[in-house]
Image: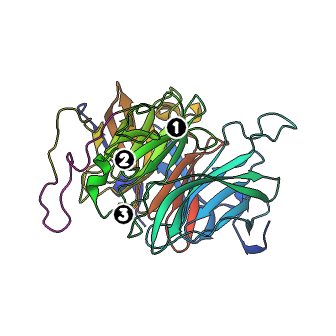
Amino acid sequence: MHDVNQTSLTSRLLIPAVGGLVLASMISTAQADIVQERLETDHINLSLERVADGFEHPWAVAFLPDGRYLVSERRGQLKLVDPDSGDIRTLEGMPEVSNQGQGGLLDVVLHPGFAQNSGDDSHDWIYFTWSKADGSNSRAALSRVKWQGNKLGEVEHLFTQDRASGPGRHYGSRLAWLPDGTLLMSIGDRGSDPSRAQAGDDHAGSTLRLTETGGVPDDNPFVGDDATLDEIYSMGNRNIQGMTVMRNGEAWVSEHGPSTGDELNHIKAGLNYGWPEVSQGNDYATNEPIGETSLPGMTDPAYVFEGRFAPAGLAEVTSATFGEWEGNLLAGGLGSEKLLRLRLENGSVVEEELILEGQVGRIRDVRQGPDDAIYVLTDDPKGGLYRLRPIDQ
């Protein structure tokens, strides 16, 4: 395990660039395991704690208003975690997923009106993305299920990708709510034919904007364009694995390039982000550049991550508890095992700071919890949920 204070903390100023059975016991919040007691950064000092572990390739974490957590596992299990008692339950009633390759049960988010009004459960919906089998192929899908206090109600299927694809990779499948109550969903290029990301009649390689019931908002950018599917919000996105809507309403994503060329993008309605005609990365086999670095009519990345970052999980720091970090982005990395802090100014990254590298492993999800702590979920056969909290300076 690296000592961040000595070996892995760096900062760079940047020139702006173009109801189930209890299956296992877990570590309770009160008994969280200290991984690193003091982690020094440029602005604040942090503690790093392991809150829970034993998940099988977890993909996303969501926080219920009563303090419990929902954690999705790629094999298709949705886990309910009680941090006070330390118990974990597998919730019954989820659909059977295709967990070939990168597929399975993926992102999980709550409806923005979840449990906002006492006695009103009309918005107590859990939304989730998953890979739906179609013969030997699969489709990216979106569903929701009503939360009934301690168990799941009936599942409602809201959206399915228009074309079945194989093999089981590049699903995208991140979710984030826009301020107007519509839902963004990413769909990757599905890995076999990158040119699909430039095809308007194909959901692959895009972000979608949907209503809370899976319909098409009337003001989507391509409504009325016969050449482009109505659900599409942006095009030319290879494989978005991190997505957040900031407090100012801006949608930001982190997406995988090929061999290097991982990108941070500010997603706007109707824009084309270039893949595969524009790329900052190289072919895996030949190491030759893929496409051009920039083209007219296509949007350049706001930032290109250094080396093979392999982005997954993206969150805005919204709590003043983190001082100078408030309003910054935190980006997780899979193969790099990194957590980066990114400071934005005028739509560009002007500062990058390395916060974690190797202490917890492959980072799949990053969220700020209702307790203001930063939570990091790791992708591993025995993945864990970790927490970063400020400590006395």
Disc 1 is placed on an element classified as: loop
Q: Is residue 257 visible?
A: no
Q: Residues within 10 Å of mark 1 (few under 14, many from 20)?
A: many
Q: Which residue is mark 1?
A: 317
Residue 75: numbered disc: none
Circles 3 and 1: CB distance less than 8 Å?
no
Is 179 located above or below residue 60 in the figure?
Answer: above
Residue 335: numbered disc: 3
Residue type at the position of mark 1: Val
Is 213 located above or below residue 308 in the figure?
Answer: above
Q: Residues within 10 Å of mark 3 (few under 14, many from 20)?
A: some
- What is the distance, in whole Å, between disc 3 and disc 1 at their CAs? 23 Å
* First of labels 2, 1 by sequence position: 2
Question: Which residue shows up at 33% across the image and 54% down it?
Answer: 256
* First of labels 2, 3 by sequence position: 2
Name the spot of residue 174 as percent of width and height, x first.
Answer: 49, 50
- What is the distance, in whole Å, between disc 2 and disc 3 at their CAs? 33 Å
Circles 2 and 1: CB distance less than 8 Å?
no
Q: Which residue is mark 2?
A: 201
- What is the distance, in whole Å, between disc 2 and disc 1 at their CAs? 36 Å
Q: Residue 86 colored magenta?
A: no
Is 344 located above or below residue 330 in the figure?
Answer: above
